[in-house]
Image: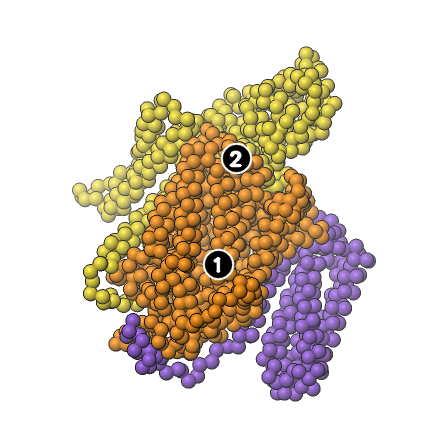
């Protein structure tokens, strides 16, 4: 699990995180210098200094925490884009991360203070082996001290709440641009259905969305439904999770700032194969996204050489559950297979999309995802060969 | 140590046939015996729930492990959660309350001894029903299986369509039974505390354990009942064709969540408040000082009781409530942290300036303080709704609540065991084994539950029977599992200590810890009638007054 | 520890306070039960109100419900009669007690008869059952839960009536009878809430 490049990779990642934290601190903050008047700085200098210190601490932490976590995760060979909530790549995720660093600093300070008092008291006030046998002073309480340690926590709560409420509204009540990419996500036991109503696309399990330049945002808004039990859409580096609940549509948005593959999975126990309801989000450049959309909008490839396989598909129970655009397969219970070969995985991430795995999935799904609702198709070898060849043409 | 106006000398009793002893125990209405029955019952289920946890941890040691099938794993985590909350934590805390409350208020028994027995057996039936599901429930996967819907049994997963067979019904019926048993015990505790205190024991002179059990019992009355109501609704849906949670007919899955968490959140305060009670009795004795700020400790607990009824939807931050609702539950959840934090400060204030004796009960109490502090702080983190949008339903939450339940509740319970075992059995537990138990459990606990936070931060959701290898969760899960195995060994040490000390422990006498509440004024174990004559008290620490007639507490009240 | 033994033998306890009286445990226990039951009813009421107007099919409350004024008066008067019964027993007027007690049972029984009649009409004339729609589910659950508690109360009242007619209920039992009366008052109070929610607000 530990690659030979690990030491240099760890160091590089560590430095990258720290530098990024410092970079964030240098840009955007303290852009307005304090004006000097008669050679004296006005009082706001002290506030600015405090602010600067706070943001410096925050920046370092924002560098340290992902660095530490990256070390932990690199020890196990994590890919470049993982599921690290401290490596956000989209605005809602970044807002959450910034807030969480603030919360961590405050709770960290509270911990250090209280722990120090605890450690001090058990050392200083320990009973000695040799002592005079008298009981210590029987103190019943102290109103001033109790008042102090009531008021200070109340103030901390007020500060935390105000910071939090701001982020809640910023994310949940974010304005929705008219030209945002709209995706409808429908959770099923145990796969994801994605529809793009404005683009006329139906696909499954792997989401493609365009990258969003912070200067010129191009967010994607998702409407979340469920066809059966509760699910939850969680791609940590792109956004916090939002549940998919039957009869209760939800909305969420994300605007990834860099291209790449982002992964996640269902985060609300939905039944036996909850663990393998994986998510794969491909953030594409505008050109790649347009190309992908164009490809998905086409009907299924018609390839005469796999006619036998197509007949197997259309005459067995496949079409009860699956749809292939442009054929008479129009089942909606299972994933749309029109462009199955445009996906990197099958069975919502449970297996890579290779002919061998596809064959195994059709023949005996319980070998890949025991308890999934895909039935074992009980096909002869000849039929299976033909069918897999046909499916391999569904690009 | 026996000639004392309120105790009796040890009596010689002839050996009874075991059948008679068994009959006595089965038909007892004595609060002390029922307390021991509750505690013994809970310890049995602690072992069962622990085995379920070990199975879970073995499965999660490596990615794509196949130690158990997903079906079995899902039953394991459902049964582990349900067992630990309802058949370990609730009974053991009711057991201690049953044993200690009448003794501490100078009464001879609870207000309603037969209701007491009835409530115990009703609760015990619950545990049996849940485990009978292993053989009695028919499901899609074969004959006889346990519920696998998670201990929250979210709708519509529990609908007939998604949970065929009877496993969900066993979950429902067992919790209805133990729920009614809990309500019976709570009513009994309240009536006992309000109506049976010895002369002179005004409410302001009750030991904090008694106060906190009063608050806890009051909470039980309005906490367990929403779950019972929701479960009746679930049965109506499953058996009478009702539509309470039927999305097709306009029913709402979210309504189940609201009802469940209106139970579920105050429930965890129901569990922790008796543990605060243990700490409030043990820390003063081993610091040799009275509790710092008794009135505020009472007020803070009552405050927690009320505010905790307003925070439930912080378990539902990801459900899609609007921003105002999310903000409301953020502020209430943070607010409930204030009185809770105050209690930690008061315990620190008790230790401050004292002469701390590091006997085993105190070791576990200090562990409690450290761990409850951390657990409270991770709770504050998740009180921030946006942070919870990432942390919720992940292993960070699992780590947080195990920190509270194992690091807080279980540590407090261990302290209570070591502290009151001498009173219950007349023998001291072994200090050596106790220290081994403490240090081994402490280290293993931190190995497991400190590290468990990290997979949560790295995106690992909960309730998954396996996980992908490329996400950085593997090594951490392996270490977490190793910690769990070591914790199991420490628990075995504890059980060994319980058994060995019963036969070989030093005789304890009435008051081995030089403590100040009324239970230490009678024999160990107490006679059936508790006190030869009903005590009269003039302060919060009647035995302090007796031991220090030159400087009694009654002078300062 | 010897200080304890010595002082214990000498004068173990301070003087007992002269006026040490605590509440009656039956009253406290019944208050606790009432609080718990109120919580259960509250959840059913919340579900009822939440689902008002949300049924996707079937008869609506407006179409099928008839306000049960007469049977409500019966039930609420039974609170009055049981109050007089308990008062009489406290003054050892056993005859009046028995009369009022039996009248309470009669009035409570009339209420149950009225409920049964209403349900018969709803099921057979309007086809409304617990599985028809959300209204059916919530209506029968809430009213049914209440009726169950009335039934349990009536059984307890009957048991007391039997013992009373056998001459075993006198002024010494008046505190216990008060506790049972508390339960009956609770059942009536719940009906006020259920009535308001189902027949006034929910239509």
- Measured from the top left, where is residue B121 in percent x and y? 57, 61
Q: Which chain is yellow?
A: A
Looking at the image, is B503 positioned above or below residue A378? below
**SS type, badge 1:** helix
Q: Work out which residue is located at the far left of the displayed protein and give it.
A: A39
The answer for which chain carries disc 2 is B
Question: Coloured how?
Answer: by chain
x 45%, y 53%: residue:
B333
Q: Which chain is orange?
A: B
Label 1 neighbour load within 10 Å: few <14, some 14-19, many 20+: many
- For the image shown, how many numbered marks are present on the structure? 2
Q: Which mark is residue B67?
A: 2
Q: Which mark is residue B39?
A: 1
* Mark sitting earlier along the chain (1/2): 1
Camera-side residue: B401 or B505?
B505
x 62%, y 72%: residue:
C183
Res B299 quadrant in image = bottom left
One can see residue A122 in this view: yes
Q: Which chain is purple?
A: C
């Amino acid at each position: 699990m530990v690659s030979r490049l690990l030491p240099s990779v760890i160091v590089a990642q560590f430095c990258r995180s720290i530098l990024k934290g410092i970079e964030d601190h240098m840009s955007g903050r303290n852009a307005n210098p304090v004006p000097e008047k008669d050679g004296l700085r006005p009082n706001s200098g002290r506030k600015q200094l405090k602010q600067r210190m706070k943001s410096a601490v925050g920046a370092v932490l924002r560098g340290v925490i992902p660095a530490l976590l990256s070390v932990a995760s690199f020890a196990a060979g994590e890919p470049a884009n993982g599921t690290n909530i401290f490596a956000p790549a989209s605005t809602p995720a970044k807002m959450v991360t910034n807030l969480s660093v603030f919360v961590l600093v405050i709770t960290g300070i509270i911990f250090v203070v209280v722990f120090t008092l605890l450690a001090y008291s058990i050392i200083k006030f320990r009973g000695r082996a040799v002592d005079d046998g008298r009981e210590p002073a029987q103190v019943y309480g102290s109103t001033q001290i109790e008042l102090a340690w009531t008021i200070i926590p109340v103030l901390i709560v007020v500060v935390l709440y105000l910071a939090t409420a701001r982020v809640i509204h910023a994310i949940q009540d974010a304005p929705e641009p008219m030209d945002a990419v709209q995706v409808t996500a429908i959770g099923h036991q145990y796969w994801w259905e994605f529809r793009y109503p404005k683009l006329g696309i139906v696909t499954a399990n792997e989401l493609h969305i365009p990258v969003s330049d912070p200067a010129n945002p191009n967010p994607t808004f998702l409407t979340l439904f469920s066809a059966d039990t509760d699910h939850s859409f969680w791609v940590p580096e792109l956004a916090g999770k939002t549940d998919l609940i039957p009869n209760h549509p939800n909305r969420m948005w994300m605007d990834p700032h860099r291209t790449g593959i982002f992964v996640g999975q269902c985060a609300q126990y939905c039944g036996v194969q909850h663990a393998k309801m994986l998510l794969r989000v491909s953030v594409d450049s505008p050109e790649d996204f347009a190309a992908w959309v164009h490809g998905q909008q086409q009907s299924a490839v018609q390839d005469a050489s796999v006619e036998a396989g197509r007949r197997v598909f259309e005459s067995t129970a496949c079409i009860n559950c699956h749809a292939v655009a442009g054929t008479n397969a129009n089942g909606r219970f299972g994933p749309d297979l029109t462009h199955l070969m445009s996906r990197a995985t099958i069975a919502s991430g449970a297996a890579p999309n290779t002919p061998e795995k596809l064959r195994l999935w059709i023949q005996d799904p319980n070998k890949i995802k025991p308890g999934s609702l895909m039935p074992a198709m009980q096909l002869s070898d000849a039929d299976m060969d033909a069918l897999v060849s046909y499916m391999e043409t569904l690009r | 140590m026996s000639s004392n106006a309120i105790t009796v000398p040890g009596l010689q009793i002839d050996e009874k046939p075991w059948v008679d002893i068994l009959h006595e125990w089965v038909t007892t209405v004595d609060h002390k015996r029922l307390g021991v029955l509750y505690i013994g019952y809970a310890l049995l289920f602690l072992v069962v729930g622990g085995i379920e946890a070990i199975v879970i941890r073995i499965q999660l040691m490596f990615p794509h492990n196949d130690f158990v099938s997903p079906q079995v794993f899902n039953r394991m985590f459902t049964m582990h959660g349900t067992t630990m909350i309802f058949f370990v934590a609730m009974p053991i805390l009711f057991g201690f309350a049953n044993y200690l409350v009448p003794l501490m208020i100078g009464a001879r028994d609870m207000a309603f001894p037969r209701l007491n027995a009835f409530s115990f057996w009703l609760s015990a039936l619950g545990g049996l029903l849940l485990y009978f599901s292993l053989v009695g429930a028919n499901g899609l996967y074969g004959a006889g299986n346990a519920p696998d819907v998670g201990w929250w049994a979210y709708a519509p997963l529990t609908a007939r369509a998604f949970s065929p067979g009877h496993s969900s019904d066993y979950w429902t019926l067992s919790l209805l039974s133990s729920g009614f048993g809990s309500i019976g015990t709570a009513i009994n505790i309240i009536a006992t505390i309000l109506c049976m205190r010895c002369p002179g024991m005004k409410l302001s002179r009750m030991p904090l354990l008694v106060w906190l059990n009063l608050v806890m019992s009051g909470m039980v009355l309005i906490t367990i009942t929403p779950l019972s109501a929701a479960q009746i609704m679930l049965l109506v849906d499953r058996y009478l064709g009702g539509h309470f949670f039927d999305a097709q007919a306009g029913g709402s899955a979210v309504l189940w969540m609201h009802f469940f968490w209106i139970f579920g959140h105050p429930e965890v305060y129901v569990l922790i408040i008796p543990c605060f009670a243990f700490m409030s009795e043990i820390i003063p004795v081993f610091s040799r000082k009275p509790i710092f700020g008794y009135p505020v400790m009472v007020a803070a607990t009552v405050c927690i009781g009320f505010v905790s009824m307003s925070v439930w939807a912080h378990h539902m931050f990801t459900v899609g409530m609007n921003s105002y609702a999310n903000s409301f539950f953020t502020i209430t959840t943070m607010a409930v942290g204030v009185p809770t934090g105050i209690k930690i400060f008061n315990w620190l204030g008790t230790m401050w300036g004292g002469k701390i004796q590091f006997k085993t009960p105190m070791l576990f109490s200090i562990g409690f303080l450290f761990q409850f502090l951390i657990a409270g702080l991770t709770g504050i983190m998740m009180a921030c709704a946006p942070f919870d949008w990432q942390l919720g339903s992940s292993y960070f939450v699992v780590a947080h609540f195990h920190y509270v339940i194992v690091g807080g509740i279980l540590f407090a319970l261990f302290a209570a065991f070591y502290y009151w075992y001498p009173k219950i059995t007349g023998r001291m537990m072994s200090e050596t084994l106790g220290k081994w138990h403490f240090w081994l459990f402490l280290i293993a606990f931190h190995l497991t539950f400190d590290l468990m936070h990290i997979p949560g931060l790295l995106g690992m959701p909960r309730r998954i029977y396996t996980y992908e290898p490329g996400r950085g969760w593997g090594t951490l899960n392996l270490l977490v599992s190793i910690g769990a195995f070591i914790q199991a060994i420490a628990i075995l040490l504890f059980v060994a200590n319980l058994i060995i000390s019963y036969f070989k422990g030093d005789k304890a006498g009435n008051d081995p810890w030089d403590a100040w509440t009324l239970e230490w004024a009678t024999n160990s174990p107490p006679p059936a009638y508790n006190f030869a004559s009903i005590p009269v008290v003039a302060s919060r620490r009647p035995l302090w007054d007796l031991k220090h007639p030159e400087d009694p507490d009654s002078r300062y009240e | 520890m010897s200080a304890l033994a010595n002082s214990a033998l000498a004068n173990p306890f301070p003087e007992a306070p002269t006026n040490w009286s605590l509440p009656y445990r039956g009253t406290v226990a019944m208050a606790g039960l009432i609080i718990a039951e109120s919580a259960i009813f509250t959840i059913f009421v919340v579900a009822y109100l939440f689902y008002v107007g949300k049924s996707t099919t079937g008869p609506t409350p407006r179409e099928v419900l008839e306000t049960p004024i007469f049977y409500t008066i019966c039930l609420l008067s039974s609170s009055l009669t049981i109050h007089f019964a308990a008062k009489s027993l406290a003054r050892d007027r056993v005859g009046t007690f028995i009369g009022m007690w039996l009248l309470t049972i009669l009035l409570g029984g009339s209420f149950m008869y009225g409920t049964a009649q209403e349900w018969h009409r709803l099921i057979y004339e309007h086809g409304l059952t617990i599985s028809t729609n959300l209204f059916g589910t919530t209506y029968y659950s809430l009213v049914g839960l209440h009726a169950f508690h009335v039934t349990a109360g009536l059984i307890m009242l009957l048991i007391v009536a039997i013992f009373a007619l056998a001459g075993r209920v006198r002024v010494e039992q008046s505190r216990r009878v008060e506790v049972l009366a508390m339960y009956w008052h609770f059942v009536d109070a719940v009906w006020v809430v259920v009535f308001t929610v189902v027949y006034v607000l929910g239509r």
